[in-house]
Image: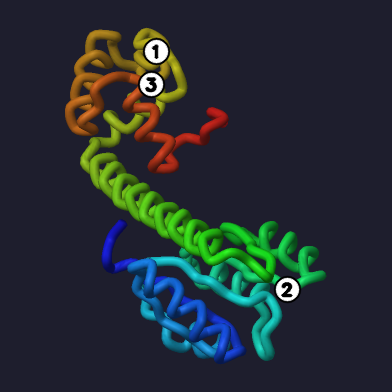
Amino acid sequence: MTNSAIVHVIDDDRDVRESLSFLLDTAGLTVRAFESGVAFLDALPRGERGCVVSDVRMPGISGTELLSRLREMGVGMPVIIITGHGDVPLAVEAMKLGAFDFIEKPFDDSVLVAAVEAALREDERREDDHAAKADVVARLAMLSQRESQVLEGLVAGLPNKTIAYDLGISPRTVEVYRANVMTKMEAASLSDLVRMAILAGAVSKSGG
């Protein structure tokens, strides 16, 4: 887990904020605490890493509203919602909005710490995915127009002869372009190439 990842604790109750901050700090995590969703959004730097732990019921912006705002802003940090007794419907709504997890009060300290650590691992995984996608997109940009057309045929599962017919070139020429594509994309196999295309959004997982 990277040291740059920060746990953002949001709760309007000062005692709860301090208690959660102390718990997470003791677990070796970097914590920032905010008394409201508005204060958190105002202080949120672009590209911030980590996760959010927020109470579901707060004045101003609720936990679910905060989640919606973050998604609208394109902030992908995992969000853990803390709910009181009887707030499970709100927690379910939060999950539908993309919350990573929800925890009911009262909760064991170990349960919260485990949830936060899982959320940070998820954020790290997403960051790795973003980096991998950017790398693949950069490689795609290096392909010539004809190489890109051959790539489209390959990920569509078309044989060389069909690609050649569709593009009005010889199967031998398709083989040359195919070799160039594999080299530029640094793909070890056709399946590797397809995975890259899916990651970059060049083709849907359903093949449509």
Q: What residue type is disc 3 on? A: Leu
Q: What element carries label 2?
A: loop
Closer to the observer: label 2 or label 3? 2
Residue at 57 percent of width and 58 percent of height: 100
Residue at horizontal 46%, vertical 84%?
Answer: 33
Residue located beneath label 3 in the image: 154
Tell which tag, 2 or 1, sits nearer the viewer.
2
Tell me, for residue 84, which label it has, or none: 2
Asked which secondary structure carries label 3, the reply is helix
User: On screen, 12 above or below 168?
Assistant: below
Task: Characterize the local packing of mark 3: few (<14), some (14-19) or many (20 or more) Cα atoms within 10 angstroms.
Answer: some
Q: Do callouts 3 and 1 mark residues in contact (Cβ within 8 Å)?
A: no
x, y (%) of residue 192?
A: 32, 26
Residue 79 appears anywhere in the view = no
Q: Is residue 153 left or right of residue 90?
A: left
Q: Where is residue 156 in the image (x, y as percent from the top left)?
A: 46, 23
Q: Quadrant of the N terminus?
A: bottom left
Q: Residue 165 carries which label?
A: 1
Q: Determine whether the residue tagged by mark 1 lies in a helix, strand or loop.
A: helix
Give the CA distance from mark 2 to mark 3. 53 Å
Q: Which amino acid does label 1 sit on?
A: Tyr
Q: Separation of disc 3 and disc 1 at Cα?
A: 13 Å
Q: Distance between the residues labelled 2 and 1?
A: 64 Å
Q: Dot 1, crowdedness within 10 Å: few (<14), some or many (≥20)? A: few
Left or right: residue 38 versus residue 176 is right
Amino acid type at image mark 2? Gly
The correct choice, above or below, for 47 with respect to 187 in the image is below
Point out the tag, 2 or 1, that comes first from the N-terminus: 2
Q: In this view, does 8 lie to the left or right of 90?
A: left
The structure residue drawn at horizontal position 54% and vertical position 90%, both measured from the top left corner, is: 35
